[in-house]
Amino acid sequence: MSTVLVLNSGSSSLKYQLVDPASGEALAAGVVERIGETSGTVKHEAKGEKTVRDLPVPDHGEALRIVIGLFDEVGPSLAEAGIAAVGHRVVHGGEVFSAPTLVDDDVVAGVRDLVPLAPLHNPANVTGIEVARELLDVPHVAVFDTAFFTTLPKAASTYALDREVAAEHGVRRYGFHGTSHQFVSSAVAAHPVVAEKLAAEGRSPETLRQVVLHLGNGASASAVLGGEPVDTSMGLTPLEGLVMGTRSGDIDAGIVFHLIREGMAAEEVDTLLNKRSGILGLSGVGDMRELQKLVAAGDADARLALDVYLHRLRKYVGAYAAVLGGIDVLTFTAGVGENDHRVRSGVVRGLKFLGLTIDPAANEARSDEARVISAGHGAEAPLVMVVPTDEELAIARQAMALVEG
């Protein structure tokens, strides 16, 4: 067996998963939370058994040491797991990193140089890489959240700013959740029903027009033509685009200047838009499950929050239909997209003019499998699908392919 240990280092957390890339099986997974606080929490799951411990976790180095200790103590043994690589999720690769990259000192420095573009994420990513390289003597591979979107057409990636200012400060649309969008769009293209649809229409896979909605606490949309992205909703940062759990998504840029002129500091506005807006700002709760409970109870603010959320989604699907010249498959993924049938039906309900429909029974059925939930599968009828994302598996497979290649 050859495995990959996938690490996702946040500012105060460390998520991990031991993956067999060949089978797709997660042999163990867990998270260390509240790193740097008085008391942290470690959750480790393997072979169906969960281990939870509360203990001080002063820094990421200690967090990874605790994780390695748990593998030794409760399994599976890392020494026997045949670890071929450690795969690191890195949020921002800028224009420098457009593919999985074998980590060396220059790569670490490059990721650190991109901190101004992702000040909330890249510092923690760098720390996680540095600590893991000290403790685990195997190849380390950085997989970048922005990589899938580095080939966006210039018309989609370019903001209408002064070109010299944009070039000096690296301002362009980078896009995020790229690992998920690539994994899901590839899974859609390989699905038997999609292959049958293309064959029935006498078309090649290069003509497949997809819109993928990655809906979690963070949310993004992508337009994918023949496996290549042609547009995406997140931009220079993960703030742009859809309404999210705590992020505003698209707003008039003038709102920022207005709030600053009214006395708010730039950092306060940053916090407002990233951590106090979105569903949370509109309703008081940032979790879609809690929002749906409030909607069911007749809460007017929650109802408005959901309406704003769905309106933005329909708006993007319609825009991407125009970009692609039509839609063959609309796919929902990530926590909300995979699990909330009310959101899925709410989006599609307003898009019947595109030929999109939903079968209520298929939509409401629970499943962990990729599936078609549209009402009709006839020739030329667009499909609606639910495809579970697996970013850890995608990172593991990309890391393994690099070290084996």
Image (tube, rainbow, N blue to C red):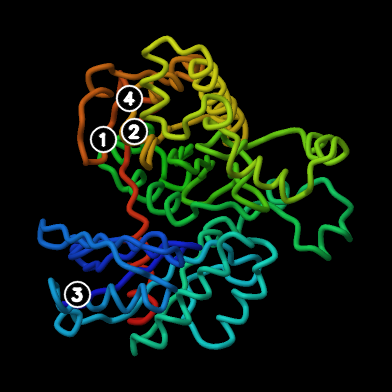
Q: In the rendered view, does 31 fall on the left or right side of 101?
A: left
First in sequence: mark 2 or mark 4? Answer: 4
**Distance between the alpha carbons at the discs numbered 1 and 3:** 35 Å
Q: What's under tag 2, amino acid-wise?
A: Met
Q: Which residue lies at the image location 62% right of the left edge and 45% below the top edge?
A: 239
Q: Position of residue 44 (x, y in %)?
A: 22, 62
Q: Are marks 1 and 3 in contact (CB under 8 Å)?
A: no
Name the amino acid, label 1: Arg
Question: In front here: 89 or 59?
Answer: 59
Q: Is residue 381 visible?
A: no
Distance of label 2 from label 4 (alpha carbons): 12 Å
**Which residue position is annotated with label 3?**
71
| Residue at mark 1 | 371
**From the viewer's perspective, is residue 313 above or below residue 21?**
above
Q: Nearer the viewer, mark 2 or mark 4?
A: 4
Cβ–Cβ below 8 Å for labels 1 and 2? yes
Disc 4 crowd, CA 10 A, few/some/many (<14, 14-19, 20+): some
Identify which amino acid the numbered label 3 is placed on: Phe
Residue beneath disc 2: 385
* Quadrant housing residue 63: bottom left
Q: Determine the residue positioned at 68% across, 53% down.
A: 236
Q: Secondary structure at mark 3?
A: helix
Between the C-alphas of marks 2 and 3, the distance is 37 Å
